[in-house]
């Protein structure tokens, strides 16, 4: 296995991780921002107020895009296993 092959494999894995985690992270970020704006406007300074809306938002996001996330990860795993002989010398 060459350094280029390892680098390509790691690069593809990192790209997949970013692509798959992006929807969940964006929803969590948006909910956190909205709750922070709400807290600023209403002068409520409760630190634990963001947890329940974030958990619900992340859960709903995983329910909506979970199949897509799993399909991408499965495709990558199949690609790795199908090209396994290329990596062994």
Image: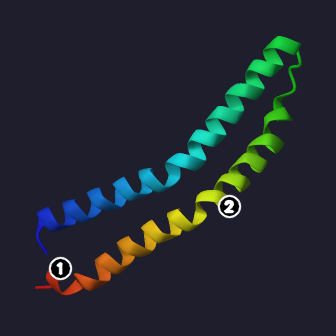
Q: How many labels does the image show?
A: 2
Q: Residue at coordinates 27% horizontally, 56% vertically from top-left?
A: 11
Disc sitting over residue 3 in the figure: none
The residue where tag 2 is placed is: 63
Which x, y percent locates residue 67?
Answer: 56, 67
Q: In the drawing, does residue 55 fall left or right of residue 82? A: right
Q: Residue at coordinates 43% horizontally, 50% vertically from top-left?
A: 18
Identify the coloring: rainbow
Which x, y percent locates residue 73?
Answer: 44, 69
Q: Judge the density around disc 1: few (<14), some (14-19), many (≥20) Cα neighbours within 10 Å.
A: few
Disc sitting over residue 87 in the figure: 1
Distance between the Cα atoms at labels 1 and 2?
Answer: 35 Å
Kindly state the secondary structure of the residue where label 2 is placed: helix
- Quadrant of residue 27 in the image? top right
- Rendered position, 76 above or below 58: below
Which x, y percent locates residue 20?
Answer: 48, 56
Q: In the drawing, does residue 62 fall left or right of residue 1? A: right
Which x, y percent locates residue 88?
Answer: 16, 84
Q: In which quarter of the image is the N terminus?
A: bottom left
Along the line of sight, the residue nearer the viewer: 77 or 67: 67
- Quadrant of residue 12 in the image? bottom left
- Rendered position, 9 above or below 86: above
Q: Quadrant of the C terminus?
A: bottom left
């Amino acid at each position: 296995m060459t350094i280029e092959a390892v680098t390509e494999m790691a690069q593809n894995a990192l790209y997949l991780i970013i692509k798959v985690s992006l929807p969940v992270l964006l929803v969590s970020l948006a909910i956190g921002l909205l709750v922070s704006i709400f807290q600023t406007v209403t002068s409520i300074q409760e630190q634990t107020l963001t947890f329940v809306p974030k958990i619900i938002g992340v859960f709903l996001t995983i329910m909506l895009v979970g199949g897509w996330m799993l399909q991408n990860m499965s495709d990558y795993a199949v690609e790795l296993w199908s090209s396994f002989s290329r990596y062994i010398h």
